[in-house]
Amino acid sequence: MTFSDAEAAVLRPLLGDIDREIAALFGPAPPEGVLASAALRASWARLIGMLALGPAPELRACPACHRDCRRAATVCGHCWTTLPPAPSGAEAALPAARSGTQSAA
């Protein structure tokens, strides 16, 4: 993933804030009235918003190697098998709920 100079200019200070707030959790007590964990959570939420990753992709198992592929894929990224069209409706509900880890073979 690459960022434009403008995006990087926003992310660098944000990452610096997060770094300082993590250090404050393990260092001397923060100034009175400041909760380091609340500041860290706020910075973390800003970072997640900046990255705007969106939801995790829907997955399905490759019929040949049984590893997870994106649901919309036409070729398995692991074994290069041509995949049949993705199932729709109720058939797709179970694989889409998987976490993105490899399937058990």
Image (cartoon, helix red, strand yellow):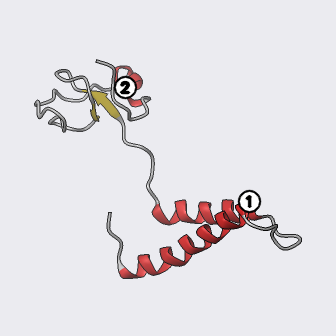
Q: Position of residue 44 (x, y in %)?
A: 60, 61
Q: Nearer the viewer, residue 62 or 18?
A: 18
**Pointer 2: residues within 10 angstroms few (<14), some, or many (20+)?**
some
Residue under the point 41% across and 22% down: 94
Which of the 4 quarters of the picture holds residue 20?
bottom right
Q: Quadrant of the C terminus?
A: top left
Q: Nearer the viewer, residue 64 or 92?
A: 64
The answer to whether 86 appears left or right of 82 in the picture is right
Give the structural element (helix, strand or loop) at label 1: helix
Instruction: Return the residue found at the far right.
Output: 32
Report the amino acid beneath label 2.
Pro
For disc 1, the marked residue is: 37
Q: Position of residue 90 (x, y in %)?
A: 39, 20
Residue under the point 25% across and 38% down: 72
Q: Quadrant of the N terminus?
A: bottom left
Q: Nearer the viewer, residue 25 or 41?
A: 25
Report the amino acid beneath label 1.
Ser
The answer to whether 19 appears left or right of 92 in the picture is right
Q: Position of residue 100 (x, y in %)?
A: 38, 35
Give the structural element (helix, strand or loop) at label 2: helix
Say which label, 2 or 1, has the lower sequence index: 1
For disc 2, the marked residue is: 95
